[in-house]
Image (cartoon, helix red, strand yellow):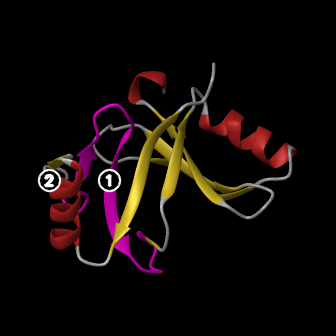
Amino acid sequence: MTNPICHVDIPLADTETGTEFYRKVFGWEIDTSFPGYPMFKAEGGPGGGFVAKGDGPMQMQSVRIFMLTNDINATLEQIEANGGQTVMPRTEIEGGHGAFAVFNDPSGTTLALYQAPAQQ
């Protein structure tokens, strides 16, 4: 399996202004049905979500890219065996929406993994 980019989180200082910006400028469809985590669909590319910009536990300072995997724990083992570091272990997404984990590559770049519910 290749591990395609499947999701992108974009931090926003102001969720309402930020989501409106992306909707108007890029024509993205914005879905606000998941409380506190508006999501976007971008035609021809992976979708994603908007998170609060900051340094708190559910915030981030820069864009985070998620790669799809069939087995988060096995992929984290490969990451660590090749010089990367687990930042956040496998974490279930509320509501049965799959799971994710966060890691740093050997350069210190923070990225994430996503495992779909059907693959759990």
Instruction: Verify CB contact (< 8 Å) between mark 1 and mark 2.
Output: no
- The kind of residue tagged 2 is Thr
Q: Nearer the viewer, residue 19 or 76?
A: 19
Residue depicted at x 65% and y 55%? 103
Q: Position of residue 8 (x, y in %)?
A: 43, 49
Q: Is residue 95 left or right of residue 4?
A: left
Q: Determine if residue 88 is in view.
A: no
Provide the secondary structure element on which disc 2 rests: loop
Residue depicted at x 18% and y 47%? 27
Residue depicted at x 50% and y 40%? 114
Residue depicted at x 76% and y 44%? 79
Q: Which residues are magenta?
A: 35-59
Q: How would you rate the neighbour count of disc 1 (Cα within 10 Å): few for under 14, some for 14-19, many for 20 or more?
A: many
User: According to the image, label 1 marks what residue?
Assistant: 49
User: According to the image, label 2 marks what residue?
Assistant: 32
Q: Determine if residue 52 is in view.
A: yes
